[in-house]
Amino acid sequence: GAGVSQSPSNKVTEKGKDVELRCDPISGHTALYWYRQRLGQGLEFLIYFQGNSAPDKSGLPSDRFSAERTGESVSTLTIQRTQQEDSAVYLCASSLVRSEAFFGQGTRLTVV
Amino acid sequence: QQQVKQSPQSLIVQKGGIPIINCAYENTAFDYFPWYQQFPGKGPALLIAIRPDVSEKKEGRFTISFNKSAKQFSLHIMDSQPGDSATYFCAASITSGTYKYIFGTGTRLKVLA
């Protein structure tokens, strides 16, 4: 596609439910990133995929968070047993190695 | 050592003014320093980037100044316009390997008409 696509754009879920967020990177981009952005705050790194290397999961805040990526294509970020503090915009970005990162529009998650 | 410290947190300038946003880092292995611009409801978009082999880079009204010895870099917006009102993030990365971007905490800029 022309850019990084994220779905859904908005998600409202009840506390305790699981949610799945999807990211379609730019075709050919080997690197894929997930960031979390709380209201009015900066970008908090969550996880990074690069080709077939083991992902860098050092930013995942708890074991309720997990992410997968199939090859160099789609990635899903799963949050289990959602809590209110998980409410944020979840941003996905992709890049070629040694190149700029392109961001999607984000998924706004609201846990009620 | 993985942090990028950004200041100020917010900034208000008059139209035509020159807002300056500063970032500092510790990891000397960083070799790519982009600035991203984010409008409300949108994802961040690359504005301008610099590598440490140059001290300044200009693209239109946007200039990055880089001080390698001080491990600092800054964004200057010349002749700022109300349309520049956005949140600006600096970032750092190591491009020689497979390395994630580390972002600053962001600066919310408002340019008054």
Image (tube, rainbow, N blue to C red):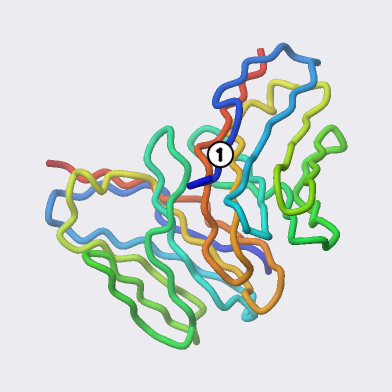
Residue A99 placement (x, y as % from top left): 55, 68
Residue B74, horizontal then vertical, whole percent: 38, 69
Residue B107, relative to residue A6: is it above or below?
A: below
Q: Position of residue B4 (x, y in %)?
A: 56, 63
Identify the element where label 1 is drawn: strand
Q: Nearer the viewer, residue B73 or B35?
A: B35
Residue shown at 50% from the left, 37% from the top: A105
- Crowding at dot 1, Cα within 10 Å, few <14 / some 14-19 / many 20+, comes out as many
Q: Chain of mark 1?
A: A
Quarter of the image with the N terminus of chain B is bottom right
Q: Amino acid at mark 1?
A: Ser
Quarter-wise, where is residue A92 in the image?
top right
In this orientation, which residue lies closer to the viewer: B76 or B33? B33
- Would residue B12 appear left or right of A59 to someone viewing this image? left
Name the residue beneath numbered marker 1. Answer: A5
In percent of width and height, residue A87 lies at 63, 26
Q: Which quarter of the rendering shows the C terminus of chain B?
A: top left
